[in-house]
Amino acid sequence: MALNRRDRSLSARSVVTVWQLLAALLIGVGVSRSIDTAPELAATFARTTLWFLFSAFVVMRLFAAAASLSRPTSHGAGWQGALPLYTLLCPLHREAASVPGLVSALAALDYPADRREVLLIAEADDAGTIAAIAAQRLPPGFHVVHVPPARPRTKPKALNYAMASARGEFIAVFDAEDAPHPQQLRAALDEFARGGERLGAVQSPLIVDNADASWIASQFAAEYAIQFRGILPLLAHLKAPLPLGGAGNHFRREALEDAGGWDPFNVTEDADLAYRLSRRGWTLGVIDTPTYEEAPAELGAWLRQRSRWIKGHLQTWLVLMRNPWRTAREMGLGGFLWMQLVLGGGLIAASAHAPLLGLLLLNGVAPQIAQVSATDWMLMIVGYVTAALAAVFAAFLERDRRLALSALTMPLYWPLSTLAATIAAVELILLPHYWAKTAHGLTRRRTPPDP
């Protein structure tokens, strides 16, 4: 499944193409000249574009809030007959502290031991993690895969390497800090059975279980709740492409191999793979049984993780836009437009939050310099209210009132994304394939309620 050798145009090994650089240069020159020659027209165009984008986000979040009021509805019979062999891929890098909890959580899955194989994937020179695994009394079906230390040293490279040893008909990915619900494998199989042969992957909701560790962690938890309880179920219901999370995702092996596996050069391999699956004609779905995760609890860790995510989303968008006509043809026009809103719009929003906040503050002290109309204010207020509603509804679903309280301070959290986007843009140029590691096991995690 060497994606770069199979189809170089689908890999992020090269960041941008020559024509993309030329297009960016022409657009930059055009914007600069329009500002010089027709500043009012340029300002109107920019405002109209942002209005359209924010309006689309408002509508999407309204529907996502409605979607979060109920759990995914299952129709039809679930999995029938003998249970297939299931392979769980668990990439670990400098995760010695998380090994005991991960082994315990995976051993607790309600699935026959002889129909489940767990591959604990460690870098061959990661002595600490290897020693932590060796110290465990591994249950039957648990195996260790040692990945040769070679560039790129990324999670998707490790996953591809381990796939050579995987025997399962279905594949799931879990990170070191994950605690999947015991019924998750069975729930995924039921959804694959109901979704038909072209359902290539399903995503479990990722739920933060250390939201009380800090303000950053609480905001992260609210953000996850909106994403996994609202937006992704909405996209799945609409049969639109949806960006998978980095863990708690399940694949038909056939679909995974058809899409070329994971791109070892993309630092958000999950979203990239999801859109490639859509391009190959596979549909994506969601299930309700959650995977509990640990959120970064301090700003530095959050920035490292978020800048990596934004950099990976930039890589993914640039790959998709190398040949937009081909992407639209393969994904379908509707899927292509949804991708632009969710992926492209998210990148623009991350870059725009801090400048917009600055504009609002400047308007308050010097309105003659920064003019913000009443309709602009109304759109931004409505946008905030709909995001808050989505968080409140998701909090109700999670039975966690703290997520609802986190919605009150969301406008202070969003501008941090602009700082992360700036770091991502610099890294995309200087360190495009660098994987900023997130440390785990640093905060107390609460025992989650049964869903």
Image (cartoon, rainbow, N blue to C red):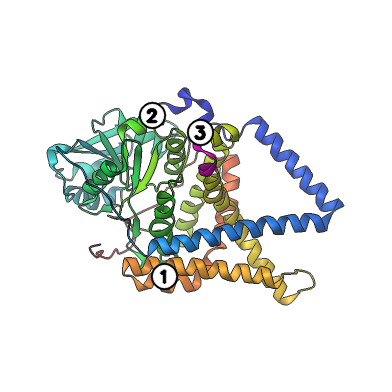
Crowding around mark 3 (Cα neighbors within 10 Å: few <14, some 14 to 19, many 20+) is some
Mark 3: amino acid? Glu
Binning the other alpha carbons within 10 Å of mark 2 as few (below 14), some (14 to 19) or many (20 upward) gives: some
In the rendered structure, the answer to whether residue 312 lies left or right of residue 150 reads right
Majority secondary structure of magenta residues: helix
Give the residue at mark 2.
258
Q: Which is nearer the eye, 307 or 184?
A: 184
Q: Which residues are magenta?
A: 330-336
The quadrant in which residue 41 appears is bottom right
Please state which amino acid type lies under the numbered disc 2: Asp
Q: Judge whether residue 322 can be spotted in this image.
A: no
Marks 2 and 1 sit apart, C-alpha to C-alpha, by 39 Å
The image quadrant of residue 65 is bottom left
Which three-letter amino acid code belongs to the residue tagged 1? Val
Q: Is residue 332 magenta?
A: yes
Sequence-first disc among 3 and 2: 2
